[in-house]
Image (cartoon, rainbow, N blue to C red):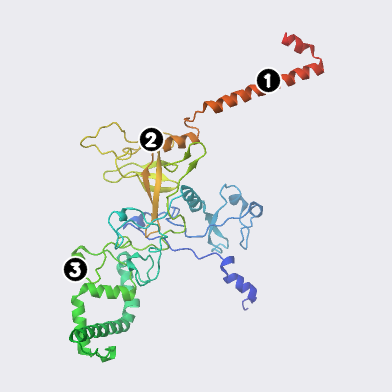
């Protein structure tokens, strides 16, 4: 029996992105050599692999989530976060395999409440001063948000490359890349080298003719180069590793690598010199846009306006929880809006340095040196999110800084934990208004007694 024919309209709807669920993303790569041995099937991944789906309450009461079969009401109506991810529409048991997607959805909502601007990984941008490289650069800057190589721009500033990042590839994957991608392009690369050799010969001949004052010779074509001359050029090029590596990387469009220490001095003599401060040379380019679509703020340079105290010099701090104490040289970890981040750097309550001229007047926060098991809910502290980046594995890396004490007091006052606002004139008006309301109520009571002619009220008044 043949398959049932599908109408053109039905086929269009099936292939349309508006009426279809995107394919799940692959498993996040491991950033540690041994993390693959300790993975859990229910652990929260660095990024969502399936699309988060929700439905209105009227449809959820019927089990209608937009799929061909209704979902059970017992598991979808008893949750306060009606968000699911569909792993398989038709499993082996002929049921739809789904699970809750509240983890990533709520994390995204809480992250956007922090109002954090995304920035590129910290590093020295080619051609930039050292002091300017310490400031976070937005991922939406025109010079950094590029995917194609353009004239006048350095390729190290791009975040998307057609070729892989070789440092992240395993040995087996690297061998397959050599066999399937590099080997078939040998002839094309040799043709590229011949064109480059012809251009170099033409340039040197034109320069020599200009010095002698003679007419320029005809342009050298790649077909004019003999095999002996080309073999000699290849032998010379193999000894010039810097030029050869640059040509191979440009031909295969490989992601930039950090310059090895032994080759750093030789790379500086290149013309033009090869920059060693690539943004993604140490960690590799990101798997998607550097913002990852979680924040579209370009800068943190904005001022908050308090309804009572007016414009604020510092942003509203966020209450973070100490989730991991300091262990040796490893800093303590804080939980901020569902994300784990390192404590702010510097001499503060998170890491006090006792040295010359230092005293122990400022005590270290509870839970930093040792795990705090006495405080209900764990030790907490106010911090201010500074910026965030996305590493090659898709993990969001938050950078925090210490907040001002005045900002902490104002944040506590908004939650009713402290009281610093005192306005005598406003309080006097409120007291006068209360007394007026009290006298008005007394007059209404007297009118009521007069109408009812209640003797008990007269006795009470007497």
The reply, left or right, for residue 134 in relation to residue 40 is left
Separation of residues labelled 1 and 3 (CA atoms): 92 Å
The residue that disc 1 covers is 439
The residue that disc 3 covers is 266
Local secondary structure at mark 2: loop
Numbered marks: total: 3
Quadrant housing residue 402: top left
**Residue at image location 19% in from the left, 68% down from the top:** 266
Separation of residues labelled 1 and 2 (CA atoms): 55 Å
Q: Earlier in the sequence, mark 1 or mark 3?
A: 3
Res. 230 in view: yes
Residue 117: give x, y in percent of width and height.
43, 53
**Residue at image location 57% in from the left, 46% down from the top:** 80
Tell which residue pokes out farthest to the front in this image: 213
* Circle 3 crowding by C-alpha within 10 Å: few under 14, some 14–19, many from 20: some
The reply, left or right, for residue 313 in relation to residue 20 is left
Q: Nearer the viewer, residue 202 or 125?
A: 202
Considering only vertical position in the picture, is 359 above or below 326? above
């Amino acid at each position: 029996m043949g398959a049932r024919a599908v109408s053109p309209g039905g086929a269009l709807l099936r292939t349309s992105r508006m009426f279809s669920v995107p394919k799940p993303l692959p498993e996040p790569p491991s950033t540690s050599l041994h993390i693959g041995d300790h993975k859990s099937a229910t652990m929260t991944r660095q990024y969502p692999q399936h699309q988060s789906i929700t439905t209105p309450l009227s449809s959820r009461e019927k089990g209608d989530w937009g799929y061909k079969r209704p979902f059970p009401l017992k598991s979808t109506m008893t949750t306060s976060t009606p968000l699911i991810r569909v792993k398989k529409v038709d499993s082996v048991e002929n049921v739809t395999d789904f699970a809750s997607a509240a983890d990533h959805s709520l994390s995204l909502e809480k992250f956007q409440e922090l109002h954090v601007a995304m920035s590129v990984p910290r590093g020295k941008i080619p051609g930039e001063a050292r002091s300017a490289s310490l400031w976070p650069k937005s991922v939406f800057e025109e010079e950094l948000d590029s995917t194609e190589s353009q004239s006048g721009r350095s390729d190290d500033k791009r975040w998307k490359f057609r070729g892989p990042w070789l440092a992240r590839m395993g040995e087996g994957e690297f061998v397959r890349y050599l066999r399937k991608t590099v080997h078939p392009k040998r002839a094309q690369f040799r043709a590229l080298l011949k064109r480059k050799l012809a251009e170099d010969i033409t340039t040197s001949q034109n320069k020599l003719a200009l010095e002698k004052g003679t007419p320029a010779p005809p342009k050298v074509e790649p077909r004019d180069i003999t095999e002996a001359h080309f073999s000699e050029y290849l032998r010379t090029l193999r000894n010039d590793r810097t030029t050869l590596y640059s040509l191979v990387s440009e031909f295969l469009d490989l992601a930039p690598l950090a310059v090895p220490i032994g080759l750093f001095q030789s790379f500086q003599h290149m013309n033009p010199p090869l920059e060693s401060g690539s943004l993604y040379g140490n960690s590799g380019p990101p798997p998607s846009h550097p913002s990852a679509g979680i924040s579209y703020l370009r800068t943190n340079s904005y001022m908050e306006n308090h309804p009572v105290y007016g414009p604020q010099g510092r942003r509203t701090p966020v209450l973070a929880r100490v989730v991991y104490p300091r262990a040796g040289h490893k800093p303590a970890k804080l939980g901020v809006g569902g994300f784990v981040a390192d404590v702010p750097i510097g001499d503060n309550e998170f890491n006090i340095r006792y040295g010359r001229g230092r005293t122990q007047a400022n005590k270290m926060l509870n839970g930093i040196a040792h795990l705090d098991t006495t405080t209900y809910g764990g030790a907490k502290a106010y911090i201010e999110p500074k910026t965030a980046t996305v590493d090659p594995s898709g993990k969001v890396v938050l950078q925090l800084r210490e907040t001002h004490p005045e900002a902490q007091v104002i944040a506590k006052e908004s939650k009713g934990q402290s009281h610093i606002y005192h306005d005598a004139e406003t309080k006097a008006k409120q007291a006068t208004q209360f007394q007026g309301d009290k006298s008005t109520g007394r007059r209404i009571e007297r009118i009521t007694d007069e109408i009812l002619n209640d003797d008990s009220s007269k006795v009470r008044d007497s």
